Image: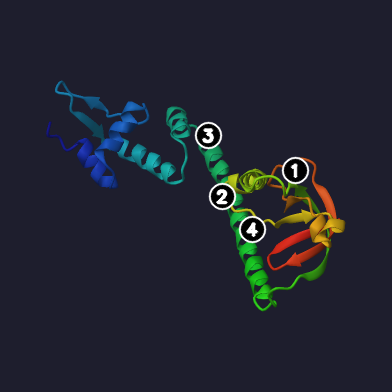
Amino acid sequence: MKDSRYFTPGELAKLFGISKQLLLYYDKNDIFSPEFVDENGYRFYVLSQYFTLQIIISLRKLNVSLKEIKAYLKSKDINLLKEIYRNKQQEYKKQIEELLYLEKTMQQKIAFLNDIQNLPLNQILLELQEEEHLYFSEDISFQTPIKHRMNILAKHMLPVFSHPSFQEYLMGFHYDSNEFFYEDLITQYNVFISANSKLHYNNPIKKKAYICAFTAMLIME
């Protein structure tokens, strides 16, 4: 059909720089269908559908779900569209907060690296820190095979690495103070990680005194 009032899928897709396959996908999912299909199976769109497709593409650029778009196109309720925009606004606010957190964390990491860059090697530095909450692993015996010990460490660290975004944390090893100064007496230790409200551990434990060894931390009871 040659009629200037209608667009073929190829013509309409070209106007938006999208593929004909995308139009077919929208049609199959009952989101955006041609105005009519002729006896030969050719699809045709009318001028008003240009503006409908414009709405769809604009919302998809905002990562609005097809389900939400379909609901709006069906109702054409302006309040529903406002709700969609409000939800995206809240999502962007959370993303901004997360980015600000990450930017602050990077500043802290750079400052920390600057502080330790000139530390003397092969020394243990004593440093008193304020009390904070720490998450402790189960007891790890030095008699346990190294592979099993690594499994315990990895299990304890899993909430950090499973979190969808980067999480700042302090990780180290805890020894009994009486055993620490007598090497032959050390029998076991724990892995610890600093408490973080975005992570999920059970029963955080408070500790106060630290021994710092470069970037790792050793907790003394």
| Among the two numbered marks 2 and 1 on one chain, the one whose residue lies closer to the N terminus | 2
Specify the amino acid type for callout 2.
Answer: Tyr
| Among the two numbered marks 2 and 3 on one chain, the one whose residue lies closer to the N terminus | 3
Give the quadrant of the N terminus.
Answer: top left
The residue that disc 1 covers is 138
The residue that disc 3 covers is 80
Q: Secondary structure under badge 2?
A: helix
Q: Is residue 171 above or below residue 19?
A: below
Specify the amino acid type for callout 1.
Answer: Glu
Q: Secondary structure under badge 4?
A: helix
- What's the coloring here? rainbow
Question: As rendered, which of 149 and 35 lies closer to the eye?
Answer: 149
For discs 3 and 4, the disc positioned in front in the rendered view: 4
Spatial distance from mark 4 to mark 2, Cα to Cα?
Answer: 14 Å
Q: In the image, is 52 to the left or to the right of 122?
A: left
Which residue is rendered at x = 69% and y = 68% of the image? Answer: 214
